[in-house]
Image (cartoon, rainbow, N blue to C red):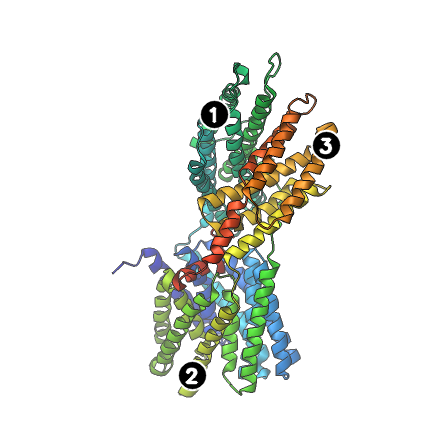
Amino acid sequence: MPRIPVDHWLLALRTVLAVWLALYLSMRLDLYQPAWAILAVMIVTLQPVMFTGGTPPIGIIIGRSVARLFGTLIGAIAGLVLIALFGQQPMLYLLFAGGWLAFCMYWVMLEQDEYLGYVMMLSGYTATLVSLTAIGTGVDNIWSVAQGRFSETALGIGCGLLAHVVIAPRFGSRALPDALSGFLSRAAAETLTTLAERRDQASRDAPLKALFQRYQDFEKLRGLARLETRRLSHFIPALDRFASDGLALITAVRELETALDYLRECDGPRECDRGEHWLAELRQQALPLLRAIESEPDGRPTERLLLADFDWEDKAVDPRTRARAELVRQRLGEVLGLLQHGRRLRNALDDPTSSKVETLPRERRSRTTHNEHFVARFNAFRVFIAFELLGQIWIHGGWHSGYLAMMLLGVFTMLFAKAPNPAAVVYQFLWGSIAAVILGGILLFLVLPTINGFPLLAIAIGIPVAIGTLMTPHPRWSLIGLAGAITMMTLLNLHSTYTFSPSSYINGGLASIIGTIAAMITYSLFRQRSPGERIETLMAAYWRGLSRLLREKSLPNRARLESRLYDRLGRLVALGGSDSVVREAIDLHALALCVWRIRRLRDALGPHRAEIEAWLDDIGRRVAARRRHDPAVWHALADEAIGWVERLYHEAHLPIASIGEIAMLSHLMRAAPGVALEARADEVSDGAGDTAANTATKATTETTGETRHAD
């Protein structure tokens, strides 16, 4: 039998003590329903455990606690409004309550910020909980229900947060400096390897994915800094800015590999026409800094290193070698600049008094996300139809306990809307609900009647809470444990005088199970879009954006462009997952930035500007017109770009940078960007069948909003 880790025992201790404190205070203060305070403790504490596998960082607990507080407040107010307007008109109530649930579902699916999405999730199902509880127990009690729901949720949040702060707190932001160091060291090491030797494509993909994973580690911890410590609060804008800069660094390393490949092909009869001659000059300048960052990424930053311009005088260098060497210098300079920026940030995290802190960004960079409106509308419609149909059965069937089924339908459909296969997740919840009904009946009819005093009541509640907490870190059992907590706290009324009414309890238990089944049927009939379809949607949005970038007269600033690419790239990687997907997604990022650079340098193209812009416009039309992109088409476009480069080599008045960027564009197009991802979308769509256990594990990740890049 496997041993239970110490961390899990500590988690159970925190949860049980927080539940006891919430139970004691809620009964001492004579609040409406103490079970709601217990439920708030367990959800705030246990839901993050489902994706961390242990005690979550305190920043996640704080963020979810604050989001749950505001979401409950908004939902309670919405529930009051619904009852005040439609309490005596059940059909209108169903219409508007379902509309509010659908509206919140729409924003849950659309909003990429984890905590804002959590606020909307709570707002949606809290409104139905408050209004349906009032309908089931008496509309006259609506104010008590709404006030009790908010006050007891706030109490439970406070108790859960206090337990995590007092008992062996875990601060995730403390690992942020080391995560940034690991990313910078890995990027410097990858750059050194690239400068030292030429590798085939297969041997490049795995290191590139490892570098991207280091970047994702930094990204996950970055969001905890603003929640866990005031010491790092003034670094938040710089950390947010480096989130985009880190992605640009990975792209620059990838482009440097490509540029070096083409420079190494230069092997003329004279030494000055050989690529290695100019590469050795760059190595001499860059290697000391790269080695220093690799070995000591947290070392004290020096003055910024700028690569010296090549001395072309008195050397009749071949134009091809000259352009390729200049392109390598530009990309290596970009890598060094971003590494040095990251090192200054890393040093500032350890030494907030450093003068280098003054050079860090002071304003947060705005984020532009790719919103999947179709998916959001699809899920909102699904929830609305299910709520209306079950409501019709409840009202016209004269089913008194039907409001419990409606409540659980609203809760489960909101909680797992982002799961890849929500029906499989709710299936796991169904078993938890059945177990909770049985255990709740034992507590209510066999245990509670024999209890006299708070200590025995605390023990009776603490045992199932501890068992559920110990189950939650295990993916196979986590959903059952959380479902049991939700269902049991919905059925138990710990504040009321005990009355022996098994028929009422059985009716309520059946309603809870029926509500869970209704949620499962809803998800089975209205399935989520498959990962393949989502990849296809993201790729179509990318091609449209690239087409606009190639064709429109106005050019977006680089920060806005990177913001859009930042969001889309993370989703593609999360959906694809393989080494080649990471590489190709970064190639797409590089392609867009390369087009942006060419458009930015258009004024330097002289008499060729109009012709080159017409050529780019034609590429934009051809890219946007295709649903699937053939490698042969990309190779033809790459040949056209090489043709332009060959023409421009002999234009002495044109800047080398412009020629080099067009050459880089040809190299990137020859790699056929997006073709493998489009094929991946077809494969994922054809083989989109996961087992219930695997799907449930994936669902816990997406439900909590944590991107495995994610997303």
Q: Nearer the viewer, residue 236 or 608?
A: 608
**Going from the N terminus, do you reach mark 3 or mark 1 first?**
1
Which secondary structure lies at badge 2? helix
Residue for badge 3: 609
Give the residue drawn at x 64%, y 48%.
625
Mark in front: 3 vs 2: 3
Mark in front: 3 vs 1: 3
Labelled disc at residue 126: none
Q: Is residue 159 left or right of residue 330?
A: left
**Going from the N terminus, do you reach mark 3 or mark 2 first?**
2
Q: Nearer the viewer, residue 344 or 571?
A: 571
Which secondary structure lies at badge 1? helix
Residue 561 seen in the current view: yes
The amino acid sitting under disc 2 is Tyr
Height in image: 388 above or below 706?
below
Q: Nearer the viewer, residue 151 or 267?
A: 267
Give the residue drawn at x 34%, y 72%.
459
